[in-house]
Amino acid sequence: MKIRRVHIDGFGKWHDQDFEFTDNPVLIYGANEAGKTTLAAFILSILFGFADGRGKNKYQQYLPKNGSGYGGSLTVDANHHQYVIKRVKGKNGGEVTITNEVGKREKAEFLTELIGPLDRELYQAIYSFNQNNILNDELDREQLEQQLQRLGAVGSQEWLQQIARLEKKAASLYKPRGRKLSLNRHLKEYDELHERVNQAQSQSSDYHRLVEEQTQIQFQLKKLQQEQPKLKEEVKKVERLQRLWPVFEQWRGHQQKAVAGIKLTDEKVVKIQEIQGQERELQKQIQVLEQQLLERQVVIKELSTSEVNNYREQKVHYQQLKDQLLTLQIQGNNQEINQQRQWQNELKQLEGRYGNSKLPVPLSEQAVSELEGLLNAISHEANNQSLYVPGIGIVLFIIGLIFHQSLIWILGIISLCAAGVLWFKQQQHEKQLAEQQHSQLRQFGKQHDLSLFPPDKWLTMQSDLHRYQDLKVQLEQVDQSKSEFNQRWKKIKRQLPIKMVADSINELINSYNRWLVEMQDRSQQLAGAEQEQTRLQNHLDQLKIQLTTELQNKEAEYKSLNIKTDADFKQLQTQRVTEQTRKITTEVYGQQLTNNDRKQLVNYTDKIFLDKDVSMAHQKLAANEQEQKKIETRLTQLKLQISSLVQNGSFSELNQQLANLQTIIWHETKQWLSEQLAIRWINGALKLASQDRYPKILQQAEKFFAILTNGRYQKIMVNDDGISTLSQEQQVFQVPELSLGTAEQLFISLRLGFITVISDQIRLPIMVDDGFVNFDNIRRGRMLELLRQMARENQVIYFTANEQIKELGSPVIDLDRLNKNKV
């Protein structure tokens, strides 16, 4: 068998990891804690089972630390086929599955065929090399032969198990130093009884008489006991006839009865019973549905209050009321109240600014134009006096003076005079005109309620009057809105379904929303109950239709049988059953009565005569049993008397006991000897089956040992005293006399010789886990070369922490690199 691929789901530090073993030997390198020993332990665990976790084995389980699945698989080549051996966590070392290359699953026992008679212990003793198991100072010829017997003969494992069972069985009978074992105890009893026999030879007369009487009455008892079965058989016979008498009478009576044929067939019965069953089931379902309908009606009645019905009828209206309340809430929010207060304050400020609690209405545009005309006219009166004429006079007067023109100078004076006259007249006119304009202005102020205010402020105060008027309008509108709000609130409250007490619109809306939610919930419950009621009613109607159909079918079937009711059908069934019972009973009674029973029972005209025969048979049997009791009582007395003599040392009895004990000892000795002979026969047979291999093992081991030591040692000798070797100088060295490395090489040579010789029967991978640390470089190189030779027949898997392995030129699986890639 060769391992081609290793897949680890979870084992120690390895999880979800694959290893391909394409080369041979397989070289695996890794520093300390790289996972070499874990990988080697995984291969052994897949082949031979996981450690059970008891005692020190719990440290050999390699349970994964990261929660990965425990186990994995090996892909192996064996017998020209490829198999996948998978083992996962489970009882007895884990659950094993074996699959061949076409996906067919093999039986779990197939693994035994692949690995042969080896178990984990024997595999590690031969095929597995590590620093802890190479050296074995206690190995001798007998151990080598035992290992060879386990592997070198077909079926040797079963024979060795049989030897173990025989040895255990023989040991339960006798051991040289045993005390409580059966044969040891009987031998001691024999010695003690033999001494008592010698002391009881003079006490035998009474004993012989009693024994003779005992023999006679035992003969009588035996005769009675021999007669007793015949008497019991006679009692049994007549009692059987007595028990069969009612059957016989029934059989004879039924033979004479007969009932007219009935139309009711099995098919009819089955069909009508199916209809009746369907009818009962439908009635049962109808009853259940009617009960459920009543329960639904109760629920609907509880839910269908006037309030809920009113809500369902006016659901849209109540939703509209909710919207109206929300609108009303928006209309009467706190922001309008604050605005109203601000307007009132502004209104008071305007009134205080003009010193009057009530201001006039603002002027219209026409009035403003009229006021502006009046004010402009008054302004032109004071400032718009004509300077044209005096100006001309002054200019002419100045020109006349400058140019010394008297005419021009006179004209200037005339102009000034004319201007004076004109100015006077104009002043009179303007005074009249001003008085008229002021009168008009006063009349305008009185007309527009402005008399209380200075005329020069009439225009400037118009913006304040407009604002004052707007504020009054807005406040009036607010008051009107409040009035309308209160009216709408009262109107909406009158339309609410219940009387809701609330100090504010918000409280009212919250109360109303709660009521709406409650009504919606109850309305939905009511709708669901009504829907369920409708569904139940529809189902009930369907069932009633089906029931009507079944009743019609039943009526048709009854009509074909000329009956009308279920009672008629039941009566017809009873008649049919009675007839069938009669036939069956007759047949059963006939089966219970053999021809011989009928012949014997016919001889009795009445049961009275049969009862007399039964009574007589019982009397004979009772007399026999009573006589046996008398004899047994006498025998008991004799046994007591004989026992008393025996206790006193009766020679005959003691002699008989001695003879009996001799017989027991002979049988036990015969059994013990037969088991010992069987053990020797099996050992001899196994030895003969493998005796030709033993010299070959030593021969191969000597060849390997010579290669490893460069011919320093040429011969290996194995005997009962242990293992020794012969050097070139013809000196004999025991194992303790060799260096540690040479001793290891000796034992490795023996194991490799064993593997080579047994390879015609078993070929398993050889695993080496840093097993050659005590070798020098030369001998380590020879060891590796030797493993290459072994790889021609067996797969070799070599684990090492020595970096020199990379320099050999062969492919190496580097665990350190794998671990780095994992990180």
Image: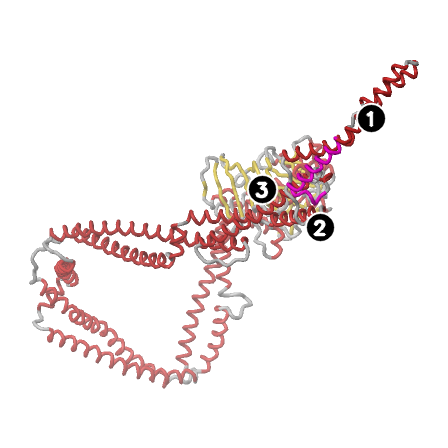
Residue 274: percent from left, percent from top: 21, 52
State the residue at coordinates (51%, 42%): 114
Q: Name which residue type carries label 1.
A: Gly
From where the camera sits, is residue 632 visible? yes
Element class at badge 3: strand
Q: Which label lies toward us, 3 or 1?
A: 1
Provide the residue designation for mark 3: 8
Whether 238 is drawn above or below 488: the answer is below
Callout 2 crowding tier (Cα within 10 Å): few <14, some 14–19, many ≥20: few
Pick whichever of labels 3 and 1 is earlier in the sequence: 3
Marks 3 and 1, how far apart in space? Answer: 138 Å
What element does badge 1 sit on? helix
Residue 3 pos. (x, y %): 56, 38
Kindly indicate whether the residue at mark 1 contacts the one at mark 3 (C-beta within 8 angstroms): no
* Mark 1–mark 2 CB contact (< 8 Å): no
Residue 815 lies, with reference to residue 532, above or below; the image says above
Which residue is depicted at the point 46% across and 65% down? 669
Residue 420 has which mark?
A: 1
Residue range of the region highlighted in magenta in the rendering? 429-453
CA gap, disc 2 and disc 3: 42 Å
Q: Calculate the distance from the C-alpha at mark 1 to the C-alpha at mark 2.
A: 170 Å
Q: Amino acid at mark 2?
A: Pro
**Depth-wise, is mark 2 or mark 3 nearer the camera?**
3
Q: How packed is label 3: few (under 14 Cα within 10 Å), some, or many (20 or more)?
A: many
User: Of the residues under marks 2 and 3, which one precedes in the sequence?
Assistant: 3
